[in-house]
Amino acid sequence: MTSARRAARDEQFAEFVVAATPRLRRTAYLMCRDWHLAQDLTQLTLARMYAVWRRIHRTADLEAYSRRVLMNAVLDQRRRRSDTEVVRAELPERAGRGADASAELHVTLMAALATLPVRDQAIVVLRHWEDQSVTTVAEILGVSPSVVKMQSMRALGRLRELLGEDFARQ
Amino acid sequence: MHPDLRGLFQRALDDEPWPAPGDPVAQAMAQGRRIRRRRGLLAGGSAAVLVAAAGLVAHLAFGPAPAPPSSLPQVAIAMGPADPSCTWPVRDAATDVSLFLSEEATAVQISGLRDALRADPGVRDVRFESRAQAYQRFKELWHDDPDFLQSVSAESLPQSFRVQLTQPSEYPRFAAAFTHRPGVADLVGRACPGTPR
């Protein structure tokens, strides 16, 4: 009885892993710009969820839960790394100067994103890639909705500034 | 609001590689069990503890062990009900310390240790945990895994002293003073925000 129930839970977990992995890995990549690290962070997220799966498996919104776990993993990783690394404060090059600038705009965007504070990066990615509402983003990051709104505006303004005309025109 | 951003993100993801080979479900489950174990059950430190822990990992990763271990002498059950805000083992600053007693610790050694702990100026509180109490806690932590519970008996769990320090900064001195005392098998410090109880 108990082990049958556990088998059913594990089955459900396996389904969740298959369904959620691509999304988690892409979001992780946008946050860290490294596919290997994105894979590790995704794996860690799934492992942390499995560790408490018995408690959460009936949770209505496992996706929202997984976003929160992933972002915490990203923030942890960043905190540890920032002890040893200096955050690059400026873009090495401004886009919009080369002939193929518009073709490489996504590269510039990723570089520009990297210059933002990590929580602002999370807000931009959750709002504009994962398409989450201000309220949901606030819950995921554990801040108030007004902080999300304010920082979101600030972050977009900064991106626009870094990306230059091309981005503003699009 | 910014469809252009979404499009740019999509292009940034174009070079997505194939997922690494392996079974992500099995990997997540194995790692998840290790996380659960670290949070709730075991505190590593000495080689003996790690050896016992490796046995547990084998069990956890591959289901019921073929032959239940007759004893896990240094299975150090951690530190009270699982509290995810605590970290261990720590080296520099600990709020609580567990002193696991060796199999051969004598009654005289244990009472001498108790006196020394009570006399130590860095100690706020001392509590003894018997094998039976350890087993009780063990059962609560693992109530959802009957197979595993069955493979561990009260006798295989160590006795311990649970010590609260007055100051986290006392820990290095405290650890140096008690690690090598007769009867002590292992000493594990834990840092919890928000203690004392």
Image: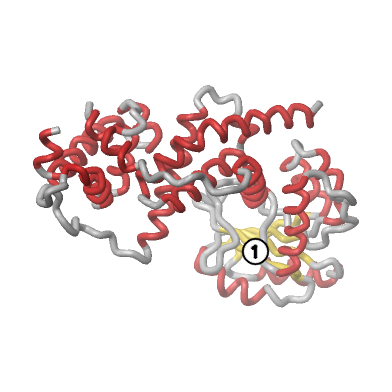
Q: Give the position of the N terminus of chain B as an image quadrant.
A: top left
Q: In the image, is residue A131 above or below residue B178?
A: above
Horizontal side, residue B100 vs residue B190: left or right: right
**Label 1 crowd bin: few (<14), some (14–19), many (20+), radius 10 Å:** many
Residue furthest to the top in view is: A60
Residue B126 position, x and y percent, is 68, 59
Looking at numbered disc 1 in the image, what kind of residue is underneath it?
A: Val
Which quadrant of the figure has residue B124? bottom right
Q: Is residue A152 visible?
A: yes
Horizontal side, residue B188 vs residue A152: left or right: right
Q: A56 or B27: nearer the eye?
A: B27
Which quadrant of the figure has residue A132? top left
Q: A46 or B154: nearer the eye?
A: A46
SS at mark 1 in the image = strand
Residue furthest to the front in view is: A99
Q: In the image, is residue A33 above or below residue A21?
A: below
The residue identified by callout 1 is: B188
Q: Is residue B124 visible?
A: no
Residue A140 position, x and y percent, is 40, 34
The residue at 26%/38% (across/down) is: B8
Which quadrant of the figure has residue B179? bottom right
Residue B46 position, x and y percent, is 70, 69
